[in-house]
Image (cartoon, rainbow, N blue to C red):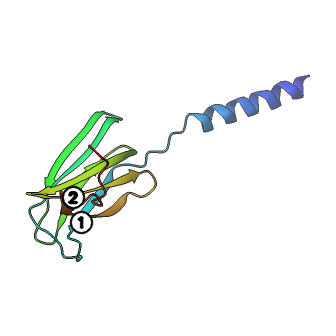
Amino acid sequence: MRSFSKVFLFFSLLLLFTACEQEVLGPYNLRVRVVNSNGIPVQNVDVRLYAPIGSDGTVNYYNRTDIAGYASFEYKYTSFLRIDATKSSWKGCAFAELSDQNDLEVVVVIKPFSDTDNGCPPA
């Protein structure tokens, strides 16, 4: 009986210490590259990261692309984000999952609003 209680105590402590360990993966660096349908980078595009419910509330971040077509974001929680890129009458959408890679790059192709193949869900 005594050896059973020692074994039980050992496994209980083992379970306690391994169950309480939480792996922290963030912060995540997300680079969004915006190009046109010919693959040419587009500058001054408004890029929005959006998720209705994030770990810290609603995710709603904005940035603008540089001359190389990049917009950079940093977010500290795992999440699934929608990316909207708009410039005048052009639009493109994509999605990014922040989970196992700390540095992630997503390419968004912008097309005219009239083009239904711009990656955006229907309104």
Q: Residue 30 appears at what percent x and percent y?
A: 29, 57
In 3D space, how far apart are the residues under numbered discs 1 and 2 (Cα atoms)?
9 Å
Q: Which residue is mark 2?
A: 72
The C terminus - image quarter: top left
Q: Residue 82 appears at what percent x and percent y?
A: 31, 48
Pick the front one: 91 or 65: 91
The amino acid beneath tag 2 is Ser
Q: Nearer the viewer, mark 1 or mark 2?
A: 1
**First reached walking from the N terminus: tag 1 or tag 2:** 1
The answer to which image quadrant residue 40 occupies is bottom left
Relative to residue 86, is residue 12 depicted above or below?
above
Mark 1 in CB contact with mark 2 (< 8 angstroms): no
The amino acid beneath tag 1 is Arg
Q: Name the residue rendered at 39%, 51% in the picture.
A: 98
Q: Residue 113 appears at what percent x and percent y?
A: 18, 57
Q: Which residue is mark 1?
A: 33
